[in-house]
Image: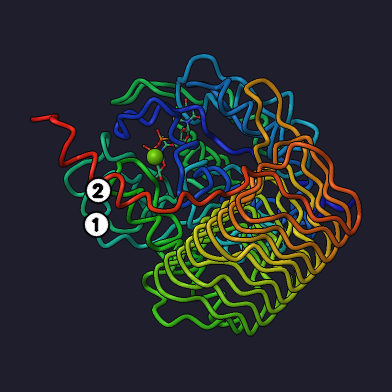
Amino acid sequence: MSGSEGVTGALVLAAGKGTRMKSDLPKVLLPALDQPVLFYVLRVLEQLGAEGAVNASAVVVGHKGEMVRDYLSEEWPGTVPIWQHQQLGTGHAVQIAKEWWAGFDHLLVLPGDVPLLTEGTLARLVEDHKKEGADCSFISFHAPNPFGYGRVVRSQNGVSIVEEKDASEEQKLLSEVNSGIYIFKVSSLLPHIYRLDNENAQGEYYLPDIIAMMVRDGLIVRAVNSGSEDEFRGINTPRQLSEAVSLIREGIVDTHLAAGVRMLDPSSVWIGPRVTISSDVSVDPFVQIWGRTSIGRGSRIGGFSVLRNMTLGCGAEVVSHAVLSDSVLGDGSKVGPFIVIRDGAEFAEKAQGGKFVEIKKSRIGRGSKVPHLAYMGDATVGEDTNIGAGTITCNYDGVNKNPTVIGDRCFVGSDTMLVAPVTLGDDTTTAAGSVVTQDVPDGALAVGRARQRNIEGWAERKRKTANGGGHQK
Ligand code: UD1
Ligand code: MG
């Protein structure tokens, strides 16, 4: 591989404590919408990986590092955690990871708390760096309020970075600042990274000090202006997190609008970064869509619904006020209002679930309906079956969850209690109010209730007893 191309590693610095968040979670794991802050940076790296611009990624972990490590192994198994047990500064974080990066040609270094960073901006940095054959390129930008950032100081001697706490009053006025995102040629980084010292206001090994050092040694250092200021917003306080979340939300909503998703009131719609929505879908006000939900063409999501990890086919309709998770709605199915669907439930094509219904881990077959006030848990319902109002699968005996199987073309009468495990064959009917404890063969009617008897003259006799009975209150 040539020097201008070469293998590129990306090192994400995420060992810091994030003191100002005042949270028990490490800063990079705080949620920004439904994903941790770190997710956004790793997704950008994943996109760069797909283009071949980055070949490996690692995250430096330290404060509450076990939690970050567990998140990586669950969600980003290809990303290596590297332990920095003592957080002695950003330069130190790069030093302790040397074993990991020393064999690459280029090393990208970026903080873990910049969730607004875009793939395009990082791709341009990598491309510019390689094209120019630079030893180090970093992103600088103009901050209207530069407080807290390292200032980029340009003089006859070249460029250097001075941290807020070390800056003179004059330097503090400079508005060009360091984004904390760098790419180094590894052969130029190696001889410099251990020459950093910690003689500064914070007693830390500052990575940005390497800039002035490389310039002094006559290496090519480029301050690249790329992207908008918002992209480099670090998350240090709950307010900054909420501001970033609101920008991320708007960005996601805009992307879906541009792709042909219609929304009556985009400002009230919340969509997570892992959601996919086809074109020609309409989303009503006050809807939340989270997790790995995917929604097929022509579907409609009614107001006040919350969807998480749902798969909707084409032309599915969620009427309104639905709470749906980890389940599937087939093509042309229709559910709600006021329905809960959860834990691996599945509505086949054109199946329906109606008002005040809960469906858990159950399959509702093609064209079948559960229109009102019902609970189906651990049930399999065949095709073209109607489940009457008030029907309940008594699936839990206090120890086990038991299955209910209902065949095709059945008519389950209103208020039937299906005491599981129990099977209703095809073309069966249950009488309203039945408690069904035994299997019902194909084509049978099950009647499982006390026979009604009418006691004639009851009202008259009751009145007489009350008048002459002598009972007084
Ligand atoms: C850093 C830069 C500053 C830049 C700013 C951009 C330094 C010294 N300063 O300042 O020039 O303008 O970012 O936002 O680098 N971290 C570790 N290990 C450590 C210390 C930090 O992993 O020992 C991680 C943190 O978790 C964080 C990142 O490195 O993700 C940046 O560290 P932080 O202390 O926030 O530096 P800033 O003061 O923001
Ligand atoms: Mg910071």
To which residue does mark 2 refer? 147
- Dot 2 amino acid type: Phe
Kindly tell me whether residue 223 is visible in this rendering. no
Point 47% across, 21% down: residue: 63
Which amino acid type is shown beneath numbered disc 1? Answer: Asn
Residue 452 point in image, percent of width and height? 57, 49
Q: Nearer the viewer, residue 438 or 315?
A: 438
Count of number-bearing discs = 2
Tell me which image quadrant ligand 2 sits in: top left
- Give the left or right position of residue 59, taking residue 201 as reference: right
Residue 273, placed above or below residue 404: below
Circle 1 sits in a helix, a strand or a loop, which is it?
Answer: loop
Vertical arrangement, residue 189 with respect to residue 175, above or below: above
Residue ID at (32%, 51%): 459
Which element type, helix, strand or loop, lies under badge 2?
loop
User: Residue 115 versus residue 461: which sits nearer the camera?
Assistant: 461
Cβ–Cβ below 8 Å for labels 1 and 2? yes
Q: Which residue is mark 1?
A: 145
